[in-house]
Amino acid sequence: MKKQKVIDKIKDNPLYPLRHSTEHVMHMAVESLFPGAKKVMGPPIENGFYGDFDYEGKITEEDFPKIEERMRDIVEANLPILMRDAGFKELKEIFKDNPFKLEMIGEIEKDGGNPTVCEIGNKEGRYYDIDLCAGNHTGRTSSIGAFKLLSVAGAYWHGDEKNKMLTRIYATVFETQEELDEYLEMIEKAKERDHRNIAKEMELFFMDDEVGQGLPLWMPNGAFVRHKAMEFAFNTYLERGYLPVTTPHIASEALWSHSGHLDFYKDAMYNSFGIEDEQYRLKPMNCPMHIKIYNHRPRSYKELPFRTAEMGTVYRYEKSGVLQGLTRVRGFTQDDGHIMCTEEQLHDELMEAMDLTMFVLKTFGFDDFEVNLSVRDPENKEKYIGGDKDWDKAEEGLKLVLKNFGFEDYITDVGGAVFYGPKIDIKVSDAIGRKWQLSTIQVDFNLPSKFNMTYIDNSGDQKTPFMIHRALLGSLERFMGVYIEHTNGAFPVWMCPLQVQIIPIGDKHIEYAQKVSEKLKEKNIRVKIDDRSETMQAKIRDAQMQKIPYMFIIGDKEIENNGVSVRLRTEENLGLKPLDEVIEKIEKMYLTKSLNLW
RNA sequence: GCCUGGGUAGUUCAGUGGUAGAACGCUUCCAUGGUAAGGAAGAGGUCGAGGGUCCAAUUCCCUCCCCAGGCUCCA
């Protein structure tokens, strides 16, 4: 039910039977090699499958070769894979020692389902397996294709950390060895693109043990790019009618108690600390403070929509195991905004927020994203505030926005809503295909009444406004993490700390290089002369590795012709060009925020 | 937080029960070069931290910290 579209995509994949059958083979191999290991479950996933086991001992990656060998043996045995119906009595007997299977069988019985099993091989043979299974296999084990075990991990039964931890093995499966090799090579390449590696090479940011986990320190290059992203976003918001606000990093506990964060969001908040007689907390969200600004004096309907914007740094308690580079940190800056509006304005404001999101993301060059509608989980109502009617209305409102925007293909994330309302989330992929949520547009019909927010309408009556929470880059940190991978560190010209590296071939060319540098600086182009005593080739290599968009090579020829030889970081050599033409071109690319270099 | 694997120079990594090595980077010197690494010398390490075993621990054992991949959670 949750994320149905994703599951459908996997089920519709023509490789599904292949992957599903391979999973059975792996279960058989593990059970035969590790006495006492009990198969639990394991579905096909995007590029392969995983299989969960209940095993008291330890299965590690060092065991993979022998598991793979046993799997190949089962493949060579060319066993038939056959589906048939099974009765509950029979199933309970077969799995009498496997509480996990018994639980699944019980569920099927409760739902009035008709269980089926698949049998691989026959009881008299060397290998035999019977498993509760809904089917879709290749006919025989000989046709399961090329596979490789990838990693071992712990996973909670039913994904609940209160349950027992099972041993999970991830594997990948393709029809041919060539496709498998191609995929493995792709994973290797993707790792090189990891923003943590690129950040090291380019000196963008780092984490320091003594400063603390999940708290990035931005070095000059990284801080520059981050600042450019922030500046562009913030200026765009102001142009689109947002009002700038600035609020503190801490607030008294009374505020968080009033807002409901202490009731619904406490796990993500850091412990309180005392200042004189009062308790304070680091802020996990900016909203209550923006509400305070709205509430500072009575508001007229003429002031609505009232839109606030702040680059607000928030702190959230994340368990150490979930931290990940820049994409999951403990302190981060949101490009946060809140829109207070009338009920009539709500739809248009949501549309405008979506439009702004698209504009901002597209300017940065994102065009492939996943749109999610995050709604409440009807089975966990205690996690949310507000009545069903309001929730239904807000969820319908967001659906309409997605429809009007032409996003028919969104994924519904049941349970993904915030405690105060449903939201539209936009996710983009990182280098190895993990999806990260950046933009979020949330409807809130709860905090306004909690904080007694009002406006006077045109007949003099007091009304409660609606509120939209929105962060388009999401957090600067996660955005940068994803963006570093998206661009592979080759940022667009307007964001680059250094736009032009001048490479004089010999010392006698430095004087002319300085003249060129002055001319570029007049146009606010960021330039540096590489006057180290290195060969031209070495200087080119270094500039290339730093992903500086333009390299100007200067020697006798260039001085004679009052020009520069331009090399792009794409390795294109444009040859000798008149200086004025080059400057004009770069300035244009820079000012139009072009994603191209030439 | 939980599962698995890691932590050796600024970086990427090799190595050993007798306190360490390469490449790149850095500093200095020599070379002045035409589109991805010119040469030489030098500096740089409490081998993640603490404890234990041992004549001797970077190496073996324990605890903790941190990193990676998962699970759960999330911007």
Image (cartoon, coloured by chain):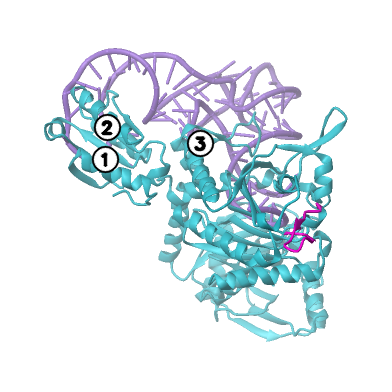
Work out whether residue A180 or residue A293 is closer to the camera in this orientation and state it.
A293
Return the chain for callout 3. Answer: A
Q: Is residue A273 magenta?
A: no
Q: Is residue A459 magenta?
A: yes
Looking at the image, which residue is at 74% across and 65% down? A376
- Percent of width and height locating residue A406: 53, 72
Segment tinted magenta in the rendering? A451-465
Q: Identify the disc placed on residue A583.
A: 1
Mark 2 and mark 1 residues within 8 Å of each other at the beta carbon: yes
Circle 2 crowding by C-alpha within 10 Å: few under 14, some 14–19, many from 20: some
Where, by quadrant of the figure, is residue B27 drawn? top left
Q: Colour of chain B?
A: purple
Looking at the image, which residue is at 64% across and 57% down? A305
Whether residue A339 is visible = yes
| Screen quadrant of the N terminus of chain A | bottom right
Q: Helix, strand, or loop for circle 2?
A: helix
**Amino acid under disc 1:** Ile
Q: Which residue is mark 3?
A: A223
> Could you tell which of marks 2 and 1 lies nearer the N-terminus?
2
> Could you tell which of marks 2 and 3 lies nearer the N-terminus?
3
Query: In this picture, is A517 found above or below A426?
Result: above
> Could you tell which of marks 1 and 3 lies nearer the N-terminus?
3
**Amino acid under disc 2:** Lys
Q: Which residue is mark 2?
A: A519
